[in-house]
Image (cartoon, coloured by chain):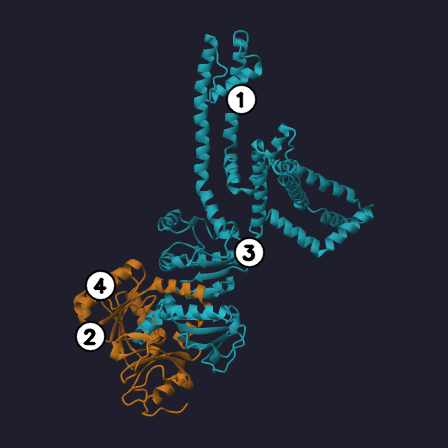
Chain colours: A orange, B cyan
Amino acid sequence: MGKKILLFGYGNHGKYIAKGLVEDGFVVQVVENNPLHHTQAVEDGFESAVEIDITKDEALIGLNPSGYQQLVCVMDDEHLNVFLTLSLRSLFEKSYILSISDSIHVTKKLQMAGANRVIDLYEVSANKIHNILNRPVATRLLDEFVMYKNGIGFKELVIPEGSFLHGLMTDEVDLSAYGVLLVGLIDEMRGHHFEFITAGFNHRLDSGDTLVCIGEEAKLAYFKQLIASPHYPKG
Amino acid sequence: MNQLLLSIALWLHHSKRYKETKHFIYDLLKGEGNPYKKYVDLSIIFLIVTSVFILIYEVKHPVPHWLDTYDIYFVSFVFSVEYLLRLWVHNNLSERIVKEYKEAEFLGREFVPVVILKAGLIEKLKYMLTPSALIDLLAIFPAYRPLRVLRIFVLFRVLKLLRYTKSINQFIEVLSNKKFELLTLLFLLFFIVMTAGIAIYVLEEQTNEQINNLFDALYWALVTISTVGYGDISPVTPEGRSISVLVIISGIAMISFATSVIVSAFSEKLSELKENRIIEQVNKSKSFLLVCGYGQMTKMFFRQYAQSYDNYIILENSLERMEQARKDGYDAIYEDASRYETLSKFNAKHCDITILCLTASDVENVYITLNAKSISSRITVIARANDSSMVSKFKHAGADHILMPNKVANSMIYTAITQPTMYKAIHAILTGKNIARMDEIHAYECESIVGRTIAELEFKRAKLLFIGIDRGGNFLFNPPSSAVIERRDTLLVMGRKISLEYFKTRYQKGC
């Protein structure tokens, strides 16, 4: 834990994201160029929040962004957001930049500007409407999983060295006995990308692979300890 | 006598079946959107077309006896039944008598049903004298063959088509908007024809052997002014010819005037007609979407999912954006969804309507929600709320789902930051990508899974990941494989689209 996030913007989105991240134990550094938002951030407990002119490269370098795992650009002004993404990319090639967009055109610009991940405000909402219309129950449940509302949620687990899972095929392991379901995995042998278990491939599990599971929070935590053991434990 | 009338009226008043039947027939004949109306209309049109066809065929060929019987008895019988039914449902005599009786009893005055009955019958008589009812009545008479002139009655059957064809009705409606102009024109025409006719009669009756009486003269005037000019009657004197010149010139002017009146009537009404057509089209379907507002959100929604929705209409109250939507290839109409009249045009009684309130203004969205719910609680409303303080207001207004774009986006950003590798997985599930859809299976839709255990359903064989059961709002995560599916259950599964579809069809057929 203790991942460091550099958050640009404390407006409509920044406010909520900052709050959630702090609750989850992230270290958040708020950056603003709007004095009103800056004051708000300080009032909300982000004493370290800084107010700078983000159009100036020197000011950005002064923040030392390379010391953070992620740079999150959620400025209210979309023009400023695109400009900021572009500046950050040109200054710090290796940083992971996440930006928010509020229209199709801005999404494209942000991608061109070099954002690693762009979240389109309207795209996600449009998806949501489609999901509500076509699978209302699944949508509600999925929302709850993402938010850990009923104690059930997703979790990423890395198979440790010497785990009993090492060498097993995905078809052989039935995790439901532990109250955990395997949704998908990153099989390092097959490349660093996520694959769903339902895609139909039979993967060989190795230590170092990442499993994405769904289950009750307590059972997931228990399962995490369990997979460290070298022997196939009994239910 | 009074007593008898009263008891009949009371009996009808209390008979539930009578009322239901009457209501059903009213709906069938006059109502909008009754699912069976279509079939009634089509069969009447069929009868009309066949009887006209028989008449035409008969001119040159002998007709088999059964066709004659069909035309004379069957068609006439159906039409007379229809006529009587229309007369019957036009107003409600028994209700009136019962009402009068109750009022008389309340006031302690004498109960005289005859007056009421008379008023009701006069109303029915008035209905019988309306043009459409007269056409209906005349259409009943079969074409009486031996008397050639009476065959003209079949034309009333053609006129009867008017009632059943919307486009002709719309044509008449459009023209009736220009009643004043057309009447003026008609009056002018009458005036010129009369003047010219009389003039030619006076000038040429003696010299022109084609003109024998005033009718010939008027006929000539009309043929000339209409620019038809058969040439069977033509003026022979210089005076007559100069009158012809004047008539011809005024005829050209009049025809161009008439054309322009009709064209302008149509161009004025064209967009309205188009919109009505779109609304009618969508009202015929079982369920449809009404999307209010064509802003960023709607654009995005349609850009991604337009092909998955067949029945939808975009309502936009800004002309510019409505045109933009049409340009983008979507069905849009220029209407204000917050008006009662707009939403009541849609058939909330027989269709499942889902309204998406996606305008940028929360106030407008709340208003549309209220408006929709006031028309029918059956309408499902999915509303967009920009401000979290509006959520409780939307709940009060009755919105079924409240969507907060900011909140949705925030939770996505949040997931992207906290669980970057999983973001992709969750995003794929949320967007319903082909490889990983999280979907629901309603037990009532796949009858044959009810009563089976989870083990029997063999999710793994179908390459589906079974996650749990939603039972009346309670979610059972990963239930034991011996759990039995109930009818009200919704199964939550994950898998590829084809796996899901395969699973659903396998159990729908009941194998």
Relative to B137, say whether A93 is above or below: below
- Crowding around mark 1 (Cα neighbors within 10 Å: few <14, some 14 to 19, many 20+) is few
SS for callout 3: loop
Q: Do tag 1 and tag 4 residues touch (Cβ < 8 Å)?
A: no
Which residue is label 4 attached to?
A113
Which residue is at 68% across, 43% downward?
B84
Give the residue type at disc 2: Ser
Whether labels 1 and 2 belong to a single chain: the reply is no
Whether labels 3 and 2 belong to a single chain: the reply is no
Whether labels 1 and 4 belong to a single chain: the reply is no
In the image: residue B462, left or right of residue B73:
left
Percent position of residue B431, x then y: 36, 67
Which residue is label 1 attached to?
B190
Give the label, 2 or 4, closer to the camera: 4
Q: Mark 1 lies on which chain?
A: B
How far apart, in angstroms, are the residues tagged by discs 1 and 4? 77 Å
Residue B192, can we see it? no
Between B85 and A60, the one nearer to me in the picture = B85
Whether labels 3 and 4 belong to a single chain: the reply is no
Percent position of residue A163, x then y: 30, 89
How far apart, in angstroms, are the residues tagged by discs 1 and 2? 93 Å
In the image: residue B80, left or right of residue B488:
right
The image quadrant that residue B213 belongs to is top right
How far apart, in angstroms, are the residues tagged by discs 2 and 4? 18 Å
SS for callout 2: helix
Give the residue type at disc 4: Ala
- Crowding around mark 2 (Cα neighbors within 10 Å: few <14, some 14 to 19, many 20+) is some
Numbered tag placed on residue A66 in the rendering: 2
Give the label, 3 or 4, closer to the camera: 3
Which residue is label 3 attached to?
B350
SS for callout 1: helix
